[in-house]
Image (tube, rainbow, N blue to C red):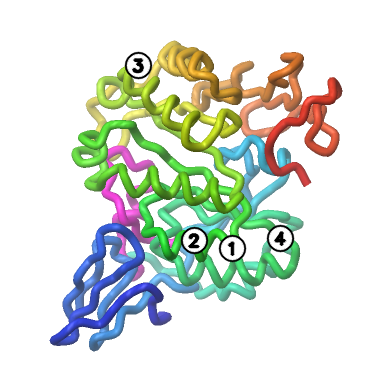
Amino acid sequence: MKEASYYKKLNNDNVQCELCPRNCIIKEGDYGFCNARKNIDGTLYSIVYAKPCAMHIDPIEKKPLYHFMPGENALSIGTSGCNLECKHCQNWSMSRSKPEDFFVKEITPEQVVENAIDNNCKIIAYTYNEPTVFYEYMIECAKLAKKKGIKNVIVSNGFINQEPLKELCKYIDGANIDLKSFDNDFYKKITNSWIQPVLESLKILKKNNVWLEITMLIIPKLNDDPEKIKQMCNWIRDNLGKDVPLHFSAFYPCYKLLGYPPTKKETLLKARKITLETGLKYVYVGNVGPSDENNTHCYECNSIAIERLSFGVVKNNLKKGKCPCGENIPGVFE
């Protein structure tokens, strides 16, 4: 365990967590909503600190991050717990669990960084569950990694308070944020949260020069309304810029949404067409097999700048982030 950051002590040994927008008031002996932080004798502790229940080596494209060091591997770690309650969560066995539900070996931040070096991973990704809930562990790993020249990325729901996010921005290099819908009713009904803090997080990441990509999992009948998708893309264009890559991903029935059909590729392609019409430059479709829409095309000459097959890079035609035609492709490429 490690004493949590971003909380305050209240009367009668109660505490208030200030890490995410829930601002949970937690009685002595209780967990916060995330199941990762616990009030013990009036002190809030991160009880997932140094207790990853998942650690794997993944291609960075799997996050997905397509404009961030293409073809490199990322040491990916996650713990139990989450501050959302998504009915379609693919990792629900981790996200809705408590640390005692897993038998895990303690792995210190120093060991995480050593593991990345030993496996020739130039990136550490904080992923699988929501990295906000293992904030203390993540930020200590990221600080050490940064000193060793290893880059740090998060795969996050973006549901975090502004001050801890601004502090985190000092140590991370890239982020893929899951923008689940552009409809607050969807957020309330399907994720048990609300959208505004996520939109603020996107703006903070962009303002702090963290490389940003966005993923939207399209679920038939729930968040596939073309007008809402258009509104979302207009917001991204106006608040974040035209160069932010957007990934549309296919849903497959899982967890509490087993009664919904899988997403058709045609639905993703329709969303992509809408997005391109709003002016966003880099739009991808995923989770539907090999597709030209997984390749990065130069916006100027339309040639393939980065060719992909599944999560692998087949050919990278960029040199120092430039297409052979001379056009700069935005991203982090070295």
Q: Main secondary structure of the magenta part?
A: loop
> Which badge, 3 or 2, comes first in the chain's sequence?
2
- Name the secondary structure under disc 2: helix
**What is the distance, in whole Å, between disc 4 and disc 1 at their CAs?**
14 Å
- Image location of residue 226, percent across then percent down: 35, 16
Q: State the residue position of label 3.
A: 226
- Depth-wise, is mark 1 or mark 3 nearer the camera? 1
Q: Is residue 135 left or right of residue 66?
A: left
Amino acid type for the residue under numbered disc 4: Ile
Mark 3 and 2 residues: CB-CB less than 8 Å, in contact? no
Q: State the residue position of label 4.
A: 150
**Vertically, is 33 above or below 194?**
below
**Vertically, is 29 above or below 98?**
below
> Which badge, 1 or 3, comes first in the chain's sequence?
1
Q: State the residue position of label 2.
A: 166
- Depth-wise, is mark 4 or mark 1 nearer the camera? 1
Residue 170 is tagged as: 1
- Image location of residue 2, percent across then percent down: 42, 80
**What is the distance, in whole Å, between disc 3 and disc 2 at their CAs?**
33 Å
- Image location of residue 168, percent across then percent down: 52, 62
Q: Is residue 317 left or right of residue 151?
A: right
- Image location of residue 319, percent across then percent down: 85, 34
**261, 213: nearer the viewer:** 213
Determine crowd level at label 4: few under 14, some 14-19, many 20+ residues with C-alpha closer than 10 A. Answer: many
Amino acid type for the residue under numbered disc 1: Lys
Determine crowd level at label 1: few under 14, some 14-19, many 20+ residues with C-alpha closer than 10 A. Answer: some
